Image: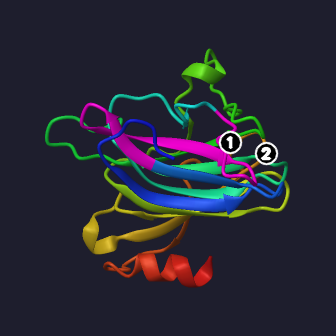
Amino acid sequence: VSYGSSYAYEPQIISDDRNGIILTWYDNRYSNTDFIFAQRLNDNGTKTWSAQDVRVAIGNKDQMFSQIISSGSNGAIITWQDKRASSGINNDNDIYAQALDSNGVLMWLLPGEVAGNAGGIPVCTATQMQLYPKIISDKNGGAFISWIDRRNGVSEEGLYVQHLDNNGGSHFTNNGLFITDRLNGNASSVIYENF
């Protein structure tokens, strides 16, 4: 599916509820920077979105570890780990999300953005590192997104969650609702077991 890239990573797949599938992944087709892409294949395996795939978020730094769910209306909601805030020795990672309609058009736009040049909705932009997002549907066109969070340091690595509605609006506190800390590297298993 991936168009013209040297490497493509971490593919994720869901049903499009129309006998086809929607996929997301990240690849480095633009220089050595990883970006998130998506594509829909119909029941014949034919691409139905852009022949060059849909770029989920415009940016100039690595976007990785995308996760995907159905939006409930033949589209998808995608979340990922984003390094746009990193600089120099500051290895900051944040969590972003985007919704695509049934035609692969980006739906969640910040003020001044247009669908062809959107950066995604910030889910968490707290200091330090937010890692490995996971996502489930809220059954109403939105999503719950959880992630590992190091805003208080690695020794107090925490689990946070945010609820986005069908317009990409946040319903929990800014930068996510704290769930627990001192996971010490076990957050991934906690997220899998509870989501």
Residue at the image point whose x is 34% and y is 28% from the top: 60
* Residue 144 shows in the view: no
Q: Quadrant of residue 105?
A: top right
Q: Residues within 10 Å of mark 2 (few under 14, many from 20)?
A: some
The quadrant of the picture occupied by the C terminus is: bottom right
Q: Is residue 122 positioned above or below 139 on the image?
A: above
Q: Does the image show residue 155?
A: yes
Q: Position of residue 112 (x, y in %)?
A: 62, 14
The residue singled out by tag 2 in the image is 166
Query: In screen coordinates, is 85 left or right of 78?
Result: left
Vertical position of residue 182 compared to residue 79: above or below: below
Kindly state the secondary structure of the residue where label 1 is placed.
Answer: strand
Q: Which residue is mark 1?
A: 99
Give coordinates of residue 68: x percent, y percent: 61, 57
Tell me the amino acid under the disc marked 1: Ala
Place of residue 88 in the rendered image (x, y in percent of width and height, measured from the top left): 15, 36
Please say which color scheme the image uses: rainbow
Secondary structure type for disc 2: loop
Closer to the camera in the image, 96 or 3: 3
Whether the residues at callouts 1 and 2 have beta carbons within 8 Å, the answer is yes
Q: Residue at x 75, y 46 (%)?
A: 75
Is residue 189 toward the left or the right of residue 69 in the image?
left
Q: Which residues are magenta?
A: 26-49
